[in-house]
Amino acid sequence: MPDGHVLDLVALAPWCWQEGAVLLGFLAATCALLRSALLLEAVLSRVAHAVVCALTLLPAVVLTGVLVFAASQHPARGWLNLGVAVAVYGAWYAGGLAPRLVRPDAELDLRWMVVGACVTFPVGVVAAFVFA
């Protein structure tokens, strides 16, 4: 990274888009793992339920913001960033599957991932068109 700014990672700059994708994938997988841990340990807690709900859609919201910000900073990469978003969704899915290795009854809620994708990808496509 020439400047060493975190915003370059978030903007998926051409010289460090791989590191930015890893950062986003780590965020998504960590949210999925924390969500699974809270679902298994704090089943009846209202606070834990609120945190689980926030962790469920947090990767989608962050990724949507990243796609818009990245398209505004590097307009020529708007369409390539959608491929990065697909890879991040793969990490999110893998993070959700990891608890099933230990506990087969662990929940992986694909419905919310689909809801997140229905928000992330249309906004990413619009951002790619608008900023291109």
Image (spheres, grey):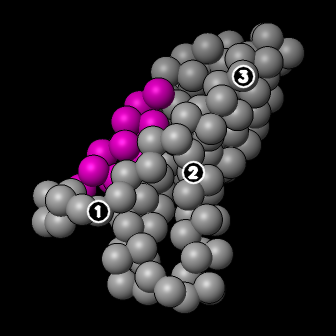
Give me the disc on residue 106. 1
The amino acid type found where label 1 is placed reads Ala
Mark 1–mark 2 distance (CA, rounded to whole Å):
19 Å
- Residue for badge 2: 59
The verdict on residue 22 being magenta is no
Q: Could you say where residue 13 lies in the image, as x and y percent from the top left? A: 59, 33
Count the marks: how many?
3
What is the secondary structure assignment of the residue under circle 1? loop
- Badge 2 marks a residue whose secondary structure is helix
Q: Answer whether residue 118 is visible to the viewer in this image.
A: yes
In depth, the one of 9 and 21 nearer the eye is 21
**Residue found 69% across the figure and 39% down from its top:** 64
Q: Which residues are magenta?
A: 86-99
Q: Say above or below: 12 vs 23.
A: above
Q: Farthest left residue?
A: 102
Q: Is residue 51 left or right of residue 43?
A: right
Along the polypeptide, which appears first: circle 1 or circle 3? 1
Residue at point 42%, 59% (across, down) = 32
The x and y percentages for residue 57 are: 61, 53
Residue 18 picture location, percent across and down: 42, 35
Q: Which quarter of the figure has residue 65? A: top right
Q: Main secondary structure of the magenta part?
A: helix
96 above or below 73?
below
In whole angstroms, how far apart are the C-alphas of marks 1 and 3? 30 Å
Q: Which residue is mark 3?
A: 122
Of mark 3 and mark 2, the one earlier in the sequence is 2
